[in-house]
């Protein structure tokens, strides 16, 4: 088949664009949207510098405030497929965050153990002086 005539192409793309916008609106107005967004932001905070993490927290708070305003005027979504999608996506993001966090936590624990071992092996300046003075 050849390319779509320009009239069909434009009506197709505007129709598809409208569908995408309608889907986005349904997702944003869904009662679980905030928890989904929070899980996404939590994934982005893993390993981020403190200032980035703080900004992501601010964004989450702003979205939560907007979400409460939007949801106060809407009934809860009763679309089983959308509910299932939102729950599954949220669960996937939570697991992804856990997978991102695990190596960092393991590395931090390793560094704490190394530091502890180095501290137990190191000789303080005072004990070094007493050792040196007792040898003379």
Image (tube, helix red, strand yellow):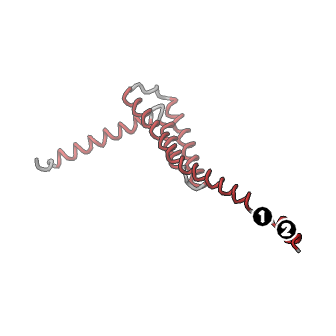
Q: Quadrant of residue 89?
A: top left
Q: Are marks 1 and 2 in contact (CB under 8 Å)?
A: yes
Where's residue 45, x and y in %? Answer: 54, 49
Residue situated in front as seen by the camera: 13 or 106: 106
Image side of residue 4 versus residue 134, left or right = left
Image side of residue 49 versus residue 133, left or right = left
Q: Residue at x 54, y 46 (%)?
A: 102
Image side of residue 16 versus residue 7, left or right = right
Q: Residue at x 70, y 55 (%)?
A: 116
Give the numbered dot on residue 17: none
Q: Residues within 10 Å of mark 1 (few under 14, many from 20)?
A: few
Q: Rounded to the nearest whole Å, what is the CA distance between mark 1 and mark 2?
A: 10 Å
Give the answer, above or below, for where 42 lies relative to 136.
above
The nearer-to-camera label among 1 and 2 is 2
Image side of residue 130 versus residue 3, left or right = right
Where's residue 120, x and y in %? Answer: 74, 57
Q: Residue at x 48, y 31 (%)?
A: 31
Give the answer, above or below, for where 87 lies relative to 134.
above
């Amino acid at each position: 088949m050849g390319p779509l005539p320009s009239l069909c192409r434009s009506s197709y793309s505007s129709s598809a664009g409208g569908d995408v916008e309608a889907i986005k609106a349904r997702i944003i107005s869904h009662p679980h949207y905030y928890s989904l967004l929070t899980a996404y932001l939590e994934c982005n905070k893993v390993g981020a510098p403190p200032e980035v993490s703080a900004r992501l927290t601010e964004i989450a708070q702003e979205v939560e405030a907007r979400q409460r305003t939007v949801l106060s005027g809407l009934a809860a979504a009763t679309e089983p497929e959308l509910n299932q999608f939102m729950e599954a996506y949220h669960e996937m993001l939570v697991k992804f965050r856990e997978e991102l966090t695990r190596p960092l936590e393991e590395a931090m624990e390793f560094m704490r153990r190394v530091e502890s071992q180095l501290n137990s092996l190191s000789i303080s300046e005072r004990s070094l002086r007493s050792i040196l003075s007792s040898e003379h």
